[in-house]
């Protein structure tokens, strides 16, 4: 679709700062000015942090982390994250950002300045290739303009509808030219479990909640922020959603919940729609309890806890502590130098286990006494391995894909002309 409009593609160094290098080149700077771009965007975020936090209720901390690195060879958590960084770019430099990727391309307008406030509308285009490397793309002419994230239109004081009116014909052209054979491939339904909480009831259960469906979700353009808006529309009586979990199909809740924090997590979730067109998403509102419940499950399996201070009333985080009766057979010691985990007494008189010299009456003991905690530990990991066996094929495929991406990025650096074949068509 975009190939006829491409006049130039510039590759940049792949040192973890490639996204900021591509932005620098797009704005007319040398790519070595990537540090200046990082600092400008971080200043934009800090100066209007509350405004951005209200506009984007999810991912703001991850965005700040991605910008807070000022050296070469940036680790993955400090790579440029799109589309959130795109909003900072548009607002800080007063430009329209076109973001191209095979997973879904979007157009980002300045949020709080309308088209009439600019004497000249500058557009920059950044493309993500192989899901791990950014390049600058120069588009010429009246090229189609990609989709606008739907949640932007709903935010208060957003100028996006005014921008949309100015570029309506080019936005509609993109929808007309978008390949229809891929349209339904990336559609799915969300089964959203909300207004409840995770509890322990013969395993982890989500209790006292409701279930609603969202159909025809296009994963090409879906963002984590849209999920937050979906939940608000479903239930405005509960407090703001504080966390989302994706339930991996075919697994138990005990081991099959993955966090949904960033658009990268959404991409991982989208890998499952090839085989599963209905995806289960769980919402926590007031406080997150599922992590504590999973820890309590391990404690009950092993028959011990690391510290009395960690115990809470009825397994709910934040309730007052209380003294509890120990489970039968649980060993408690008061000596500072002794561990109360897995204690097995050995008689110094007869050498057998199960009693000491004072209580030895020649009855002997069983040398093969096994520790109940170790048995429970073995049983737990056997069950865990059984649950994880269903995940291994997906994990292997994702690992192979990552290896392929790394090799492809190296190929791009050696053959820059090959990039054009990977721009979204």
Image: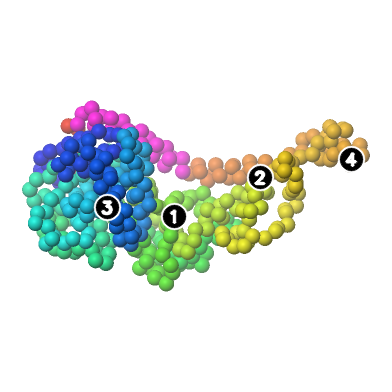
- Of callouts 3 and 2, which one flags the residue occurring earlier in the amino acid sequence? 3
Task: Specify whether residue 205 is in view.
Answer: no
Residue of label 2: 376
Give the magenta part as a residue range.
391-416
Q: Residue at x 43, y 67 (%)?
A: 239
Principal secondary structure, stretch drawn in magenta:
helix
Dot in front, 3 or 4: 3
Q: Nearer the viewer, residue 36 or 422?
A: 36
Residue of label 1: 245
Q: Which of 285 and 202 is in front in this view?
A: 285
Query: Tag 2: Cα neighbours inside 10 Å, few (<14), some, or many (≥20)?
Result: some
Compared with 349, 120 (above or below) is below
Query: Tag 3: Cα neighbours inside 10 Å, few (<14), some, or many (≥20)?
Result: some
C-alpha gap between disc 3 and disc 4? 74 Å
Mark 2 and mark 1 in contact? Answer it, CB < 8 Å. no
Pinpoint residue 56: horizontal percent, then vertical percent.
32, 58
Q: Residue at x 21, y 43 (%)?
A: 23
C-alpha gap between disc 2 and disc 1? 28 Å
Asked where in the image residue 356 lies, by quadrant, the reply is top right
Dot in front, 1 or 3: 3
Mark 4 and mark 1 in contact? Answer it, CB < 8 Å. no
- Of callouts 4 and 1, which one flags the residue occurring earlier in the amino acid sequence? 1
Q: Is 34 situated left or right of 238 in this image?
A: left
Q: Nearer the viewer, residue 275 or 238?
A: 238
- Of callouts 4 and 2, which one flags the residue occurring earlier in the amino acid sequence? 4
C-alpha gap between disc 4 and disc 2? 30 Å
Compared with 123, 168 (above or below) is below
Among all residues in the image, which is located at the extreme right? 361
């Amino acid at each position: 679709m975009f190939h006829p409009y491409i006049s130039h593609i510039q590759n940049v160094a792949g040192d973890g700062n490639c996204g900021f290098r591509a932005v620098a080149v797009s704005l007319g700077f040398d790519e070595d000015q990537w540090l200046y771009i990082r600092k400008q965007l971080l200043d934009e975020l800090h100066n209007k942090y509350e405004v951005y936090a209200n506009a984007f209720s999810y991912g703001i901390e991850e965005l700040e982390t991605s910008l807070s690195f000022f050296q070469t060879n940036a680790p993955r958590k400090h790579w440029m994250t799109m589309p959130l960084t795109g909003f900072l770019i548009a607002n800080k430099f007063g430009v329209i950002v076109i973001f191209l990727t095979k997973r879904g391309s979007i157009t980002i307008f300045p949020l709080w300045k309308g088209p009439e406030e600019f004497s000249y509308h500058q557009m920059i285009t950044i493309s993500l290739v192989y899901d791990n490397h950014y390049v600058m793309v120069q588009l010429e002419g009246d090229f189609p303009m990609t989709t606008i994230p739907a949640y932007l239109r709903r935010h208060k004081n957003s100028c996006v509808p005014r921008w949309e009116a100015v570029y309506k014909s080019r936005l509609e052209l993109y929808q007309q030219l978008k390949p229809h054979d891929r349209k339904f491939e990336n559609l799915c339904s969300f089964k959203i479990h909300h207004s409840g909480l995770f509890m322990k009831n013969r395993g982890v259960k989500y209790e006292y909640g409701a279930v609603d469906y969202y159909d025809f979700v296009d994963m090409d353009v879906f963002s984590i922020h849209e999920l937050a808006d979906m939940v608000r529309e479903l239930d405005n009586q509960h407090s703001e959603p504080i966390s989302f979990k994706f339930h991996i199909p075919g697994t138990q809740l005990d081991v099959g919940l993955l966090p949904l924090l960033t658009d990268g997590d959404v991409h991982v979730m989208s890998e499952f729609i090839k085989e599963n067109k209905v995806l289960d998403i769980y919402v926590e509102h007031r406080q997150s309890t599922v992590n504590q419940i999973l820890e309590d499950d391990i404690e009950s399996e092993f028959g011990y806890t690391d510290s009395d201070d960690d115990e809470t009333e009825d397994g709910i985080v934040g309730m007052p502590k209380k003294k509890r009766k120990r489970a039968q057979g649980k060993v408690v010691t008061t000596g500072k130098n002794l561990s109360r985990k897995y204690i097995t007494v050995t008689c110094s008189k007869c050498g057998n286990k199960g009693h000491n010299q004072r209580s030895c009456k020649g009855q002997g003991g069983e040398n093969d006494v096994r520790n109940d905690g170790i048995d429970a530990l073995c049983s737990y990991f056997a069950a865990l391995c059984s649950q994880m066996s269903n995940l291994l094929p997906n994990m292997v495929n994702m690992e192979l894909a990552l290896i392929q991406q790394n090799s492809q990025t190296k190929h791009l650096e050696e053959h820059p002309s090959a990039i054009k074949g990977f721009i979204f068509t």
